[in-house]
Image: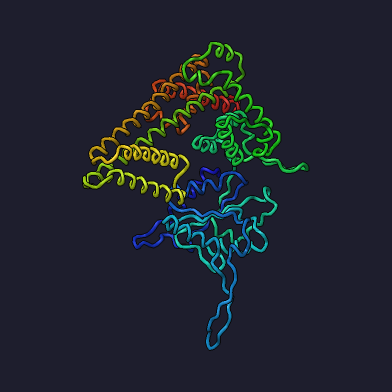
């Protein structure tokens, strides 16, 4: 199965294992809650899927790569305890609590979440001394003599033997106590994830042209050469930061992430061209509606991969504006909700308390920041949600500074000042929305003149449909030309694909 299907299955399993009956007991008893065993190649996204599942299910996550541990850290250290059995005093060997079990209790205490997922990675690659402990863990849900706490779902992951020389096979007794899911790389599924998290547009465009280079692991006499989904994502983060710093990645640096020399060389050459197209075609000019006439002349003789790269660059520019609009909208909404709570709180505040309004407002912000920290510790915020909350709190802190600068004011005056601050923020939100809408209209102007209703327009409209930031913006703000092309052009494209499929079917059956 692909990683998307695996994620869905894990989500369903977590919900089922944590479901309770009318007496408050788990509907599926712990002994029947089979651990999930994910088997798949390295770098495919198993760990990130667990983070997403925990966040979306609202439970805690404790993750360990077990190959980093010894038997002592997994089981605990032995110590001697005196016991009285029958009529004799005896010395008995017992064990301290496993570091892994202790970390579960620490996570529960830090987050306030009593249920969660215990994720153990590379479980079939452990040392010989630790292997029996892992079998006991899967079969009995214990580390040494310490059981995994109630309400914690066990998920383990391992690598098939062709990817790791240290792999140990599980016996039938163990396999009959787990739910095994075999995962394979899947580029279309990964692209959905990549669009959502903002993978660099050059990588998405490159893999659109060279899908065979998404995931490869090759071993021969010269060694192991590989490229993984993890490598592409980590490289994407580096490229984004390099661009902000005015730096450019070369082939040697790319090869540190894409450890397949031929693919690293190929992508490095493509990245150079990608940046060159951005400058030569003037993507920012296109989005500003000031296209140079030479751009259209150049496109007449440009190969398809160059035209596709230009479309990708235009979409990347739009994504930046859509994301800015969405962030401005989210921050404004959060500040509005916060302001409503402040109004209610100010209504109960006596007028004769010095600096009472600003003290109350600052305390509210402090409480919100503490909640953000709790959610962050519990890993219940994704990168985007965290950014929105931090931006909101920074804006509120600025309001508090303005309020304190105004000096001692009554509750009515304080709220009026805060309302003025919000109006200014709402104006910034409208400006971001208008800038994104104008850029989108300029992009359609260019696409129509440059490509008409060709394949490039199909790609453009399709990407607007599937990219989360674009989809959210279009749903909220609309765009007449997008909806027209989405209805007519994509329908024609689907009809053409169906006709090709029918024609191929007829050829296979001799035209009958």
Count of numbered circles in the view: 0
Q: Relative to 23, is 481 above or below?
A: above
Q: Quadrant of the N terminus?
A: top right
Q: Residue at x 52, y 15 (%)?
A: 450
The image's colouring method is: rainbow
Location of residue 64 (image quadrant): bottom right
- Tell me if residue 338 can be seen: yes
Location of residue 208 (image quadrant): top right
Q: Residue at x 46, y 29 (%)?
A: 465
Q: Relative to 278, is 253 above or below?
A: below
User: Residue 146 location, x and y as percent?
Assistant: 52, 67
User: Residue 274 location, x and y as percent?
Assistant: 60, 25
Q: Viewed as shown, does residue 266 lie left or right of 434?
A: right
Looking at the image, which residue sits at the far right?
221
Q: Front-most of 305 and 99?
A: 99
- Tell me if residue 173 can be seen: no
User: Residue 447 location, x and y as percent?
Assistant: 49, 18
Q: Front-most of 353 and 391?
A: 353
User: Residue 114 location, x and y as percent?
Assistant: 42, 58
Q: Quadrant of the C terminus?
A: top right
Location of residue 251 (image quadrant): top right
């Amino acid at each position: 199965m692909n990683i998307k299907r695996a994620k869905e299955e894990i989500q369903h399993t977590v919900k089922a294992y944590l479901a309770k009956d009318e007496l408050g007991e788990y509907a599926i008893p712990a002994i029947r809650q089979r651990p999930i065993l994910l088997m798949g190649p390295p770098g495919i996204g198993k760990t990130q899927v667990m983070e997403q599942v925990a966040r979306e299910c609202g439970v805690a996550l404790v993750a360990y790569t077990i190959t980093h541990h010894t038997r002592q850290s997994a089981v605990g250290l032995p110590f001697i305890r005196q016991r009285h059995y029958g009529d004799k005093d005896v010395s008995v060997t017992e064990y301290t609590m496993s570091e892994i079990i202790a970390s579960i209790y620490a996570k529960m205490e830090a987050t306030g979440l009593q249920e969660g997922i215990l994720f153990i990675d590379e479980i079939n690659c452990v040392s010989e001394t630790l292997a029996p402990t892992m079998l006991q863990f899967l079969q009995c849900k214990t580390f040494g003599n310490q059981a995994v706490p109630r309400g914690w779902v066990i998920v383990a992951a391992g690598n098939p033997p062709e990817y790791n020389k240290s792999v140990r096979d599980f016996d039938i007794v163990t396999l009959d106590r787990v739910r095994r899911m075999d995962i394979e790389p899947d580029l279309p599924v990964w692209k959905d994830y990549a669009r959502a998290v903002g993978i660099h547009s050059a990588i998405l465009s490159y893999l659109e042209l060279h899908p065979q280079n998404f995931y490869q692991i090759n071993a021969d006499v010269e060694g192991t050469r590989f490229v993984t989904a993890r490598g592409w994502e980590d490289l994407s983060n580096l490229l984004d930061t390099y661009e902000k710093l005015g730096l450019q990645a070369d082939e040697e640096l790319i090869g540190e992430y894409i450890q397949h020399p031929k693919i690293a060389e190929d992508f490095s050459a493509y990245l150079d061209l990608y940046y060159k197209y951005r400058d030569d075609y003037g993507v920012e000019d296109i989005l500003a509606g000031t296209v140079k006439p030479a751009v259209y002349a150049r496109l007449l003789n440009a190969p398809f991969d160059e035209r596709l790269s230009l479309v990708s660059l235009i979409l990347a520019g739009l994504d930046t504006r859509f994301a800015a609009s969405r962030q401005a909208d989210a921050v404004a909404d959060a500040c509005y909700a916060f302001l409503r709570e402040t109004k209610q709180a100010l209504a109960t505040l006596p007028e004769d308390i010095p600096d009472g309004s600003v003290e109350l407002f600052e305390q509210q912000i402090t409480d919100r920041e503490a909640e953000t920290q709790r959610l962050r510790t519990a890993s219940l915020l994704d990168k985007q949600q965290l950014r929105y909350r931090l931006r909101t709190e920074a804006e509120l802190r600025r309001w508090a500074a303005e309020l304190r600068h105004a000096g001692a004011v009554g509750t009515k005056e304080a709220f009026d000042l805060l309302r003025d601050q919000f109006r200014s923020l709402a104006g910034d939100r409208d400006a971001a929305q208008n800038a994104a809408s104008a850029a989108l209209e300029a992009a359609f102007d260019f696409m129509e003149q440059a490509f008409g209703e060709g394949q490039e327009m199909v790609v453009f409209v399709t990407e607007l449909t599937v990219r989360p930031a674009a989809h959210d913006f279009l749903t909220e703000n609309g765009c007449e030309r997008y909806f027209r092309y989405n209805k007519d052009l994509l329908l024609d494209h689907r009809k053409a694909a169906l006709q090709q499929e029918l024609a191929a079917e007829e050829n296979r059956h001799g035209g009958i």
